[in-house]
Protein backbone atom coordinates (compact mmCIF):
# COMPACT_ATOMS: atom_id res chain seq x y z
CA UNK A 1 0.00 0.00 0.00
CA UNK A 2 1.50 3.30 -1.14
CA UNK A 3 -0.12 6.38 0.38
CA UNK A 4 0.20 9.91 -1.07
CA UNK A 5 1.35 8.51 -4.39
CA UNK A 6 1.33 12.01 -5.91
CA UNK A 7 4.22 12.97 -3.57
CA UNK A 8 6.55 10.30 -4.96
CA UNK A 9 9.56 11.93 -6.73
CA UNK A 10 9.45 11.65 -10.53
CA UNK A 11 12.60 9.49 -10.64
CA UNK A 12 11.04 7.06 -8.18
CA UNK A 13 7.86 7.07 -10.26
CA UNK A 14 9.88 5.82 -13.23
CA UNK A 15 11.30 2.98 -11.13
CA UNK A 16 7.88 2.08 -9.77
CA UNK A 17 6.42 2.03 -13.27
CA UNK A 18 9.18 -0.31 -14.45
CA UNK A 19 8.54 -2.60 -11.48
CA UNK A 20 4.80 -2.69 -12.20
CA UNK A 21 5.39 -3.50 -15.86
CA UNK A 22 8.11 -6.13 -15.48
CA UNK A 23 7.21 -7.55 -12.03
CA UNK A 24 10.93 -7.73 -11.27
CA UNK A 25 13.10 -6.21 -8.57
CA UNK A 26 16.68 -6.42 -7.35
CA UNK A 27 17.35 -6.53 -3.59
CA UNK A 28 19.75 -3.92 -2.28
CA UNK A 29 23.32 -5.18 -2.61
CA UNK A 30 22.38 -8.04 -4.93
CA UNK A 31 23.15 -8.47 -8.61
CA UNK A 32 20.30 -10.89 -9.28
CA UNK A 33 16.78 -9.94 -10.24
CA UNK A 34 13.82 -11.61 -8.63
CA UNK A 35 10.20 -11.99 -9.63
CA UNK A 36 7.52 -10.33 -7.52
CA UNK A 37 3.99 -11.53 -6.92
CA UNK A 38 2.26 -8.61 -5.25
CA UNK A 39 -0.86 -6.50 -5.54
CA UNK A 40 -0.19 -2.77 -5.35
CA UNK A 41 -2.74 -0.40 -3.83
CA UNK A 42 -2.15 3.34 -3.91
CA UNK A 43 -4.00 6.28 -2.42
CA UNK A 44 -4.07 10.06 -2.55
CA UNK A 45 -6.29 12.84 -1.27
CA UNK A 46 -5.78 15.14 -4.26
CA UNK A 47 -7.42 15.31 -7.68
CA UNK A 48 -5.31 12.73 -9.53
CA UNK A 49 -6.09 14.06 -13.00
CA UNK A 50 -5.04 17.55 -11.91
CA UNK A 51 -1.82 16.10 -10.48
CA UNK A 52 -1.14 14.49 -13.89
CA UNK A 53 -1.94 17.74 -15.67
CA UNK A 54 0.38 19.68 -13.34
CA UNK A 55 3.23 17.23 -13.92
CA UNK A 56 3.31 15.92 -10.33
CA UNK A 57 2.28 12.42 -11.37
CA UNK A 58 3.44 10.69 -14.53
CA UNK A 59 0.61 9.99 -16.94
CA UNK A 60 1.84 6.50 -17.81
CA UNK A 61 2.10 5.60 -14.12
CA UNK A 62 -1.43 6.91 -13.57
CA UNK A 63 -2.76 4.67 -16.35
CA UNK A 64 -0.90 1.69 -14.93
CA UNK A 65 -2.24 2.23 -11.40
CA UNK A 66 -5.78 3.21 -12.37
CA UNK A 67 -7.03 -0.32 -13.04
CA UNK A 68 -9.72 -0.43 -10.33
CA UNK A 69 -10.37 3.10 -9.05
CA UNK A 70 -12.18 3.47 -5.73
CA UNK A 71 -13.48 6.86 -4.71
CA UNK A 72 -13.90 7.01 -0.93
CA UNK A 73 -16.23 9.85 0.09
CA UNK A 74 -15.15 12.07 2.99
CA UNK A 75 -16.30 11.02 6.44
CA UNK A 76 -18.96 13.74 6.56
CA UNK A 77 -20.71 12.04 3.62
CA UNK A 78 -20.82 8.61 5.29
CA UNK A 79 -21.86 9.45 8.82
CA UNK A 80 -23.05 5.90 9.47
CA UNK A 81 -19.36 4.97 9.70
CA UNK A 82 -18.61 7.49 12.45
CA UNK A 83 -20.15 5.48 15.28
CA UNK A 84 -18.43 2.25 14.21
CA UNK A 85 -15.05 3.91 13.78
CA UNK A 86 -15.34 5.79 17.07
CA UNK A 87 -16.13 2.54 18.92
CA UNK A 88 -13.17 0.84 17.23
CA UNK A 89 -10.76 3.60 18.24
CA UNK A 90 -12.16 3.69 21.79
CA UNK A 91 -11.44 -0.02 22.27
CA UNK A 92 -7.97 0.33 20.75
CA UNK A 93 -6.90 3.25 22.93
CA UNK A 94 -8.59 1.93 26.06
CA UNK A 95 -6.44 -1.18 25.69
CA UNK A 96 -3.28 0.79 24.86
CA UNK A 97 -3.69 3.32 27.69
CA UNK A 98 -5.18 0.77 30.14
CA UNK A 99 -8.39 2.78 30.56
CA UNK A 100 -11.90 1.67 31.49
CA UNK A 101 -13.77 3.54 28.74
CA UNK A 102 -16.25 1.23 27.04
CA UNK A 103 -19.05 3.40 25.63
CA UNK A 104 -20.15 6.90 24.61
CA UNK A 105 -22.90 8.97 26.15
CA UNK A 106 -25.77 9.98 23.81
CA UNK A 107 -24.55 13.61 23.85
CA UNK A 108 -21.04 12.51 22.95
CA UNK A 109 -22.32 10.49 19.99
CA UNK A 110 -24.42 13.42 18.83
CA UNK A 111 -21.38 15.67 18.99
CA UNK A 112 -19.40 13.20 16.89
CA UNK A 113 -22.18 12.76 14.33
CA UNK A 114 -22.84 16.47 13.80
CA UNK A 115 -19.21 17.47 13.26
CA UNK A 116 -18.03 17.65 9.63
CA UNK A 117 -14.58 16.05 10.18
CA UNK A 118 -12.42 18.00 7.70
CA UNK A 119 -9.51 15.75 8.74
CA UNK A 120 -11.58 12.62 8.05
CA UNK A 121 -10.76 9.33 9.81
CA UNK A 122 -7.36 10.46 11.08
CA UNK A 123 -8.92 13.43 12.85
CA UNK A 124 -11.60 11.19 14.35
CA UNK A 125 -8.94 8.77 15.61
CA UNK A 126 -6.97 11.55 17.29
CA UNK A 127 -10.08 13.01 18.93
CA UNK A 128 -11.12 9.63 20.34
CA UNK A 129 -7.59 8.80 21.43
CA UNK A 130 -7.32 12.07 23.35
CA UNK A 131 -10.75 11.58 24.94
CA UNK A 132 -9.86 8.08 26.14
CA UNK A 133 -6.42 9.10 27.40
CA UNK A 134 -7.75 11.96 29.52
CA UNK A 135 -10.92 10.32 30.79
CA UNK A 136 -11.12 8.35 34.03
CA UNK A 137 -14.71 7.22 33.45
CA UNK A 138 -16.22 4.24 31.68
CA UNK A 139 -18.44 6.54 29.65
CA UNK A 140 -16.95 9.06 27.22
CA UNK A 141 -19.02 12.23 27.65
CA UNK A 142 -19.56 15.14 25.29
CA UNK A 143 -17.17 17.30 27.37
CA UNK A 144 -14.45 14.72 26.71
CA UNK A 145 -14.83 15.21 22.94
CA UNK A 146 -12.64 18.21 22.17
CA UNK A 147 -13.30 19.74 18.73
CA UNK A 148 -12.08 22.99 17.14
CA UNK A 149 -13.90 25.93 18.70
CA UNK A 150 -14.59 27.50 15.32
CA UNK A 151 -16.89 24.61 14.44
CA UNK A 152 -20.49 25.81 14.92
CA UNK A 153 -22.73 23.83 17.22
CA UNK A 154 -24.88 21.82 14.81
CA UNK A 155 -27.34 21.02 17.60
CA UNK A 156 -28.68 24.55 17.20
CA UNK A 157 -29.95 23.66 13.73
CA UNK A 158 -33.62 22.99 13.28
CA UNK A 159 -34.75 19.48 12.41
CA UNK A 160 -35.53 20.61 8.87
CA UNK A 161 -32.06 22.15 8.38
CA UNK A 162 -30.27 19.10 9.74
CA UNK A 163 -32.38 16.75 7.63
CA UNK A 164 -31.81 18.81 4.47
CA UNK A 165 -28.04 18.71 5.01
CA UNK A 166 -27.96 14.93 5.44
CA UNK A 167 -30.25 14.37 2.43
CA UNK A 168 -28.05 16.59 0.25
CA UNK A 169 -24.93 14.67 1.32
CA UNK A 170 -26.63 11.36 0.53
CA UNK A 171 -27.86 12.55 -2.90
CA UNK A 172 -24.41 13.74 -3.96
CA UNK A 173 -22.67 10.54 -2.87
CA UNK A 174 -25.36 8.39 -4.49
CA UNK A 175 -25.17 10.26 -7.81
CA UNK A 176 -21.38 10.09 -7.90
CA UNK A 177 -21.52 6.36 -7.27
CA UNK A 178 -23.96 5.83 -10.15
CA UNK A 179 -21.85 7.88 -12.55
CA UNK A 180 -18.75 5.94 -11.57
CA UNK A 181 -20.52 2.61 -11.99
CA UNK A 182 -21.90 3.54 -15.43
CA UNK A 183 -18.82 5.42 -16.64
CA UNK A 184 -20.61 8.75 -16.96
CA UNK A 185 -23.49 7.40 -19.06
CA UNK A 186 -26.43 9.57 -17.99
CA UNK A 187 -29.13 7.34 -19.51
CA UNK A 188 -27.90 4.18 -17.79
CA UNK A 189 -27.33 5.99 -14.49
CA UNK A 190 -30.86 7.46 -14.61
CA UNK A 191 -32.34 4.03 -15.36
CA UNK A 192 -30.45 2.50 -12.42
CA UNK A 193 -31.83 5.24 -10.18
CA UNK A 194 -35.31 4.65 -11.68
CA UNK A 195 -35.62 8.33 -12.47
CA UNK A 196 -36.52 10.28 -15.57
CA UNK A 197 -33.43 11.42 -17.49
CA UNK A 198 -34.44 15.07 -17.18
CA UNK A 199 -34.99 14.76 -13.43
CA UNK A 200 -31.63 13.02 -13.11
CA UNK A 201 -29.94 15.89 -14.98
CA UNK A 202 -31.65 18.34 -12.62
CA UNK A 203 -30.12 16.55 -9.63
CA UNK A 204 -26.67 16.64 -11.22
CA UNK A 205 -26.95 20.38 -11.81
CA UNK A 206 -28.29 20.89 -8.29
CA UNK A 207 -25.20 19.29 -6.78
CA UNK A 208 -22.83 20.76 -9.42
CA UNK A 209 -21.50 17.35 -10.42
CA UNK A 210 -19.24 17.44 -13.48
CA UNK A 211 -20.26 14.47 -15.62
CA UNK A 212 -17.34 15.03 -18.01
CA UNK A 213 -14.95 14.09 -15.24
CA UNK A 214 -16.26 10.53 -15.25
CA UNK A 215 -16.46 10.33 -19.04
CA UNK A 216 -12.97 11.77 -19.45
CA UNK A 217 -11.45 9.13 -17.19
CA UNK A 218 -13.12 6.34 -19.12
CA UNK A 219 -12.10 7.69 -22.52
CA UNK A 220 -8.48 8.00 -21.52
CA UNK A 221 -8.47 4.42 -20.26
CA UNK A 222 -9.91 3.28 -23.59
CA UNK A 223 -7.26 5.25 -25.50
CA UNK A 224 -4.55 3.66 -23.39
CA UNK A 225 -5.81 0.15 -24.09
Image (cartoon, helix red, strand yellow):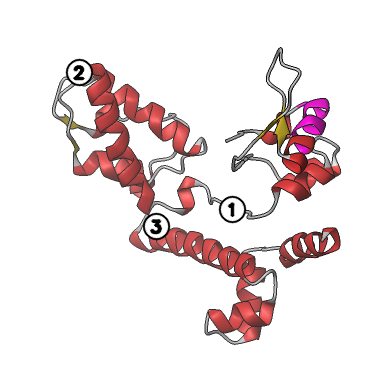
**Residue that numbered label 2 is attached to:** 98
Is tag 2's residue or tag 3's residue first in the polypeptide sequence?
Answer: 2
Q: Is residue 10 rendered magenta in the image? A: yes
Between marks 2 and 3 in the image, the one whose residue lies nearer the viewer = 2
Residues rendered magenta in the picture? 9-17
Between marks 1 and 3 in the image, the one whose residue lies nearer the viewer = 1
The residue depicted at 25 percent of the width and 17 percent of the height is 97
Across and down, in percent, residue 32 comes to 74, 23
Q: Is residue 52 above or below residue 8?
A: below
Choose top left, top right, bottom left or bottom right for residue 198: bottom right
Across and down, in percent, residue 3 comes to 61, 33
The residue depicted at 64 percent of the width and 72 percent of the height is 182
Left or right: 2, with 221 as reference point: left
**Residue that numbered label 1 is attached to:** 71
Structural crowding at the residue carrying mark 3, measured as other residues with C-alpha within 10 Å and reported as few (<14), some (14–19) or many (≥20): some
Prevailing secondary structure of the magenta residues: helix
Task: State how many labels appear.
Answer: 3
Which numbered dot is residue 107? none
The N terminus - image quarter: top right
Amino acid sequence: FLDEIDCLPLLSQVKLLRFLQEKEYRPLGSTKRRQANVRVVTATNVDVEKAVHDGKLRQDLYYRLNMIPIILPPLRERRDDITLLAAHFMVRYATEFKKNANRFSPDALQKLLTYDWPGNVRELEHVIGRAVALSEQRIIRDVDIVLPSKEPDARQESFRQAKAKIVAQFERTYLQGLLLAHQGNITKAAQAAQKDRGAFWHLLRKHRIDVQRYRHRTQKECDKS
